[in-house]
Amino acid sequence: MAKRIFSTVLLWLIILATMWFFQARGGIVLLVLVATLTLREFYQMAGMMGHRPFVRLGLLFGAAIALAPVVESRWPLVTPENILAVAAVVFAVRIVGERTSENRVESIGWTLFGLVYVPFLLQFLVRILLVDTPHANTGLALALWLIAVSKFCDVGALLSGMAFGKHKMSPVISPKKTWEGAIGGVLTSAALGAGIAYFFSEYFPTNFGPLLAAAVAAPIAVLGIISDLVESVIKRRAGTKDSGATIPGIGGMFDLSDSLLLTAPAGFLIFSLL
């Protein structure tokens, strides 16, 4: 627990310091790095299952997908969707001459699924960072709000589960998760989301008050829990407890970014409506 708390505090200090000094550009660099490292761990777990994804080229395409929103305003054809389409063509050509007949389908399937599930979904956080409003830091504030609401749901769920947890939520997928913990996590996210919107209101859209922030944070937190369960499904299939050992007390980069994979596109859609 001590290692987990230390790593969590250290990671938040790194995130806040990077975005304070380098603002949106620093956040984009961090997100591209996180997307690439998460995808690498995803491919490693696919390898543990006996599959052979195209790792090196997949990571290259993954970094390009995560970075694409930054350049597509200048080069309209360089979009995440187009890069993903090119990747599908390239890997389809490769499996004709590579891999064995027993694993060609799995190789292209896991390679492309990794690109869709990790960098393609995380690039929506990059889009949030690039939100254009009269206030220069609105996109940065919205991205930090989404990350905080998504990740602190884990903290609230852990503490609530330890204190009140009795009813298992998904005993087969994740035996330690309880319904009481999930409710505590959602309430923690709602309270945190409202608090951030209240105390830093000058950085957010005028209609994004504490009540709306709390209402938006609740479904975001639920998606974060589901995203965490999806990662647990993948890890169980790979026969591993953690996706890696990059972060002491937490695990790998996938263990850090898992809850952001589903909340990033949902947050972008909600913020676009606002």
Image (spheres, rainbow, N blue to C red):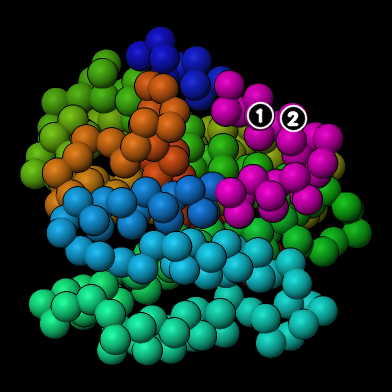
Between 7 and 206, which is closer to the camera in this rendering? 7
Residue 113: mark: none
> Image check: 56 left or right of 207?
left
Q: Which residue lies under the disc numbered 2? A: 17
Q: From which residue to which does the magenta span run?
A: 10-33
Is residue 27 part of the magenta span, yes or no? yes
> Image check: 134 left or right of 144?
right
- Is residue 30 visible from the viewing direction of this image? yes
Q: Residue at x 35, y 14 (%)?
A: 1
Q: Residue at x 58, y 21 (%)?
A: 10
Q: Is residue 43 above or below residue 146?
A: below
List x then y, in percent, for residue 49.
Answer: 16, 56
| Tags 1 and 2 touching, CB below 8 Å | yes
List x then y, in percent, for residue 139.
Answer: 75, 54
Between 254 and 211, which is closer to the camera in this rendering? 254
Residue 14: mark: 1
Residue type, numbered disc 1: Ile
Q: Is residue 81 above or below residue 68?
A: below
Q: CA distance from mark 1 to mark 2?
A: 5 Å
